[in-house]
Image (spheres, grey):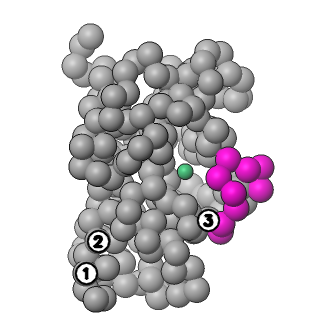
Amino acid sequence: MCKNTKMEQTLWVAHTLFDQGMVTGCTGNISFKQEDKIYISKSGSCFGNLTNEDFAILDIHGEILEGKPSKEYPLHLYLYRLNECNQAVLHTHSFYSTLLTCQARQKEELFKDLLITTPYLSIKTKNHIGWVPYFAPGSQELFESFMTQMNEKTNLYLMERHGLIVSGSSVMNVFDLISEMETSAHLHYCLNQ
Ligand SMILES: [Zn+2]
């Protein structure tokens, strides 16, 4: 397989996130768009040993063409439909970012703090961080709530008591954004001890 294919890059990102401890167990899901199809990690797959056999295929209308996608696939689908520039989507329960999402009551202050901790998160998100109130993972309520929260200016959403989801122009772009968020969340945690 050519090293520069979207699949190859996606596998590298999944393995790297797992090795770095940013994704644990069989949590997290990753997808990319190729031509008019969406390739998304299958339900129950593990980032640590993800292979090209572990992807389900959907069309842009949400019809499942092959395999059983992650139950959170509608979140990915909505982001692709929202903006054609979105070519990859990544969802994780990374520790420090998730820790922040358990502090919903102070979220306005939290966002302000996060965006001034270092300049990089602010630069990469253009100061737009979305917030998705808690609903059970994989539930219709979560999908409907996400639809009302998402907007074209925002590529990063914190999901209350759950994790985060990011979209971007490439799989390397979403890897970079999620890594920046996790670093900022970690710094924020350490600064507030
Ligand atoms: Zn999740």
Percent of width and height locating residue 129: 48, 68
Q: Are marks 1 and 2 in contact (CB under 8 Å)?
A: yes
Q: Amino acid at mark 2?
A: His
The residue located at (26%, 10%) in the rendering is: 1
Please indicate whether residue 67 sits to the left or right of residue 17 in the image: right
Front label number (2 vs 3): 2
Chain part drawn in magenta: 133-141
Specify few, some or many for label 2: CA neighbours under 10 Å numbering under 14, 14-19, or 20 or more: some
Give residue 104's position: percent from left, percent from top: 56, 79
* C-alpha span from label 1 to label 3: 24 Å
Residue located at (48% from left, 58% from top): 164
Cβ–Cβ under 8 Å for marks 1 and 3: no
Q: What amino acid type should be assigned to the residue bearing mark 3?
A: Val
Query: Could you say which disc has been placed on residue 100 in the image?
Result: none
Identify residue for label 2: 186
Q: Residue at the front extreme?
A: 25
User: In the displayed structure, would residue 107 be above or below residue 128?
Assistant: below
**Would you name the residue on which mark 1 appears?**
190
Measured in 3D between alpha carbons, the distance from the residue under mark 2 to the one under mark 3, in whole angstroms, is 20 Å
- Please give the name of the residue rendered at 56% of the width and 55% of the height, measured from the top-left corner: 152
Q: Is residue 144 visible?
A: no
Mark 3: secondary structure: strand
Label 1 vs label 2: CA separation?
Answer: 6 Å
Please tell me which residue is depicted at 65% across the width and 52% down the height of the picture: 137
Please state which of residues 94 and 26 is positioned toward the viewer in this rendering. 26
Q: Position of residue 47 (x, y in %)?
A: 38, 36
Q: Which mark is residue 132?
A: 3
Mark 1: amino acid: Cys
Location of the C terminus (image quadrant): bottom left
Left/right placement of residue 79 relative to residue 144 reads left
